[in-house]
Image: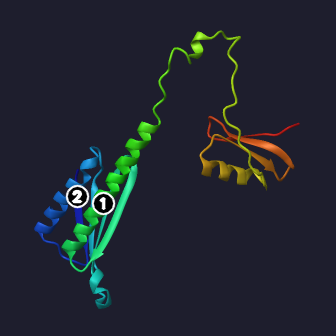
Amino acid sequence: MEVNVHARNVQLNGEYKEAARSKISHAARFFDNTGDADVEVSEEPNPRRADQRYRVEITTRAAGQTVRVEAASATAESALDLAVDRFGKQLRRMKERLVKRSRNHRPPPVTAIDSPLDQDEDERIPNIVKVKQFVMKPMTPEEAILQMDLLGHGFFFFHNAESDLPSVLYRRRDGDYGLIEPA
């Protein structure tokens, strides 16, 4: 992991930069493939904010997501320590979520009793395993596209305000959308 340390309104010595590199590399031990880390140290010259005079921002990419933390303190060293602690906690939480998600989405084991391959095609009857009910407010197809994208679904059932009919909006393979309405 490469750590780029730069400053704004403050001069940093080599010891500080080396300490920042080693602390951030140690905090990033949860991921093997973290991107380059960008560390920005800035000084606020306002005397009223003496307790938050130095600000440290750490930004990197890990597991396809941008991780950004910042901390402020009276000294540059304590601001760095606070930011590194937050950085490590955030990476640890993200790793725990990824591990938990991968463990929860493991398919259940197939047993010989449950196997649909043992049944004849005529005997196998599909079951309705979930029923959803919701109130449909009338909306335009454009609003339905936004709602579908927010939900992350491949289709969206809605009441079309323009035609006053129930409609289904779906995402096509070419990236465009299709609309199904009753005749």
Q: Earlier in the sequence, mark 1 or mark 2?
A: 2
Q: Amino acid at mark 2?
A: Ile
Residue under pointer 2: 24
Where residue 118 sits, quadrant-wise, is top right
Front one among 52 and 103: 103
x 26%, y 68%: residue: 82
Which residue sits furthest bottom? Answer: 47
User: Where residue 169 sits in the image (x, y, percent)?
Assistant: 72, 42
Residue 141: image location, x then y, percent: 75, 50
The secondary structure type at the circle numbered 1 is helix
Q: CA distance from mark 1 to mark 2?
A: 8 Å
Confirm whether residue 39 shows in the render: no
Residue at image location 15% in from the left, 68% down from the top: 16
Residue 138 location (% of width, % of height): 80, 54
Residue at (34, 57) in percent of width and height: 90
**Is 99 placed above or below 71 here?**
above
Badge 2: few (under 14), some or many (20 or more) residues near its Cα, within 10 Å? many
Residue on which the image places disc 1 = 87
Residue for point 31% across, 88% down: 46
Near-viewer residue (73 or 115) = 115
Q: Is residue 115 left or right of residue 72?
A: right
User: Between residues 181 and 93, which one lies in front from this camera angle?
Assistant: 93
Please give the label number shown on residue 22. Answer: none
Q: Is residue 54 above or below residue 5?
A: below
Q: Residue furthest left?
A: 15
Q: Is residue 139 above or below residue 72?
A: above
Q: What is the count of numbered marks?
A: 2
| Contact flag, marks 1 and 2 (Cβ < 8 Å) | yes
Report whether residue 81 is seen: yes
Specify few, some or many for label 1: CA neighbours under 10 Å numbering under 14, 14-19, or 20 or more.
Answer: many
